Amino acid sequence: MGVDVNGTVAEGFEPVRDAFVRNFEALGERGAAVAVYRDGRRVVDLWGGARDVDGTEPWQRGTAQVIRSATKGVAAAVPLLLHQRGELDLDAPVGEYWPEFKAHGKDRVLVRHVLNHRAGLPLLDHPITPEEALDPYRGPEAVAAQAPVWEPGTDHGYHALTYGWMLDELVRRVTGQSAGEWIADTIAGPLGLDLWLGLPSAEEAAGRPGRVGPLADVPEPAPGPGPRVRPKRAVTEAYDDPDSLTRRAFSAITPFPDQNDPAYRASALPATNGIATADGLARFYAALIGEVDGTRLFDPATVEAARAEESAGPDRVLVVTTRFGLGYMLHGSASPLLGPGSFGHPGRGGALGFADPETGIALGYVTNGFRKTVTADPRAQALVRAVRTVLKD
C-alpha cells in the first residue's frame, strides 16, 4: 500500500516528488517533508507518511521535527551576522569576549576556530549529564574548564556538541541574548519561519495537532541488487572504541538526552536540538543567499565567508574527509550537496539544509525516521540528486 504524499511542486520539479515518494517505497521512510526554494520562491513543498511512531497520525504541512546537527548551520548565522554588523571579530581570541575561556592554553583559540572546527575542543574529559545539559550555563562552563586535545588552529575535527556551547556563550557575551533568543528575534520572526532553538511552550502545548513529531529509529532498508556498500572499517572502529576522539566527542553529554522529552526540546543546544519544518529550514537558507519576501540575511561578502574553505582533509573526529567553511559543511565526499559552491549542514539521523548561490537553490529536509548516518543520509541524498537532475534538464 502506498504512502499518501501531499503538497505541490512547480513545473519541472516533478523528479523531486518522484524521489520523495521512492524514499517511502524503497528507503524505509516513515514520515518526512521536503521544501525547495529557487531565487527566493518556493518550488517544492511536500510532506507525507506518519508523524508518530505507530503510524496512526498523518504528517501535516506544519509538522516540525528535531533536526539534530542541521541546527549548527542555523546557529552559525548568528556570529556571522554579528560579524557583518561589526559586533564580533572572527579573528579575535574567544577569551577577548569570554575571559574565563582562556584557561589551559585556550587563549590561542580564535572565534574563527569555533566555527571551522579547529578549536581543539571536540570533547569533555568530564562529560555532563542530560540534566546539566538543560542548564544553559553548565555546558559553557565545562568547555571553559577543558584543555585542548590538539594545538588550536593546527588541525580540524568535528565538534559535535562543544561547538554549540562555545557559540552560545560567545553570542551571549556579545549581545546579552542566547543564540536561540537572537534567532527568534532577528531571523525567525522577521522571516516568519517555523524554526526554533528552544521550542516555546505555546508550540509544545499547542492546540496544533502534529506540530512536533517524535523521533524514533527506523530499520535500515534491505540492500538492493548489486554490491553491498559497507561502512569503512576505520569509521566503524572509531565509533566502537570508547577511548577514541569520535566516541568521546559524541559523548560530551552522557547518556544522550531523550530527544522527545519536552524539557529537551524547550532547551537550546545550538549544536543539536533545533526544531524546524522543512519549509522553515529551506526558507532560512533561501534568505541567506537572496531576498525572501523582501528580507535578506547575508550580504554577498558574508555568503563568501560562510562558504570559503577553512578546514579540509581527514577529520580527527568523523574519521572521513570533511570540508568546512565558517560554521557550515561544504560540498564534498562526506556530505554531498548540490555543487561545489553549496554550503549547509546535515543532521545525524537524516535532516539536511543547504543553499547553493550559483543556482539560487535552498533545500530543507526533515524526517522522524532516525538512522545512524551522520553526514550523508541516503534519503536526503536522493532528494539532492533529484534537484540536480532538474537543473540539468
Image (tube, rainbow, N blue to C red):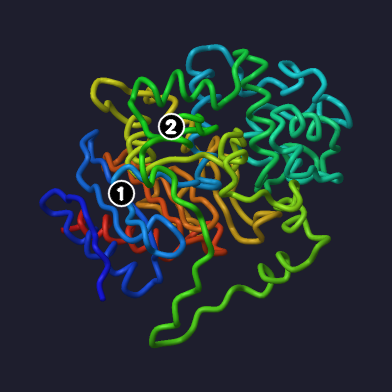
Q: Is residue 238 left or right of residue 64?
A: right
The N terminus sits in image quarter: bottom left
Label 2 residue SS: helix
Above or below residue 128? Residue 339 is below
Q: Position of residue 160 (x, y in %)?
A: 65, 47
Count of numbered labels shown in the rendering: 2
Q: What mark, if any, has residue 41 been given in the picture?
A: none
Q: Which residue is mark 2?
A: 304
Above or below residue 52? Residue 21 is below
The C terminus sits in image quarter: bottom left
Q: Is residue 19 left or right of residue 166?
A: left
Label 1 residue SS: loop
- Say which of marks 1 and 2 sits in front: 1
Res. 224 image quadrant: bottom left
Q: Nearest the camera: 42 or 6?
A: 6
Q: What mark, if any, has residue 60 been given in the picture?
A: 1
User: In the displayed image of the protein, which residue is found farthest to the left?
Assistant: 11
Q: Residue at x 62, y 36 (%)?
A: 269
Q: Amino acid at mark 1?
A: Gln
Q: Position of residue 215 (x, y in %)?
A: 51, 55
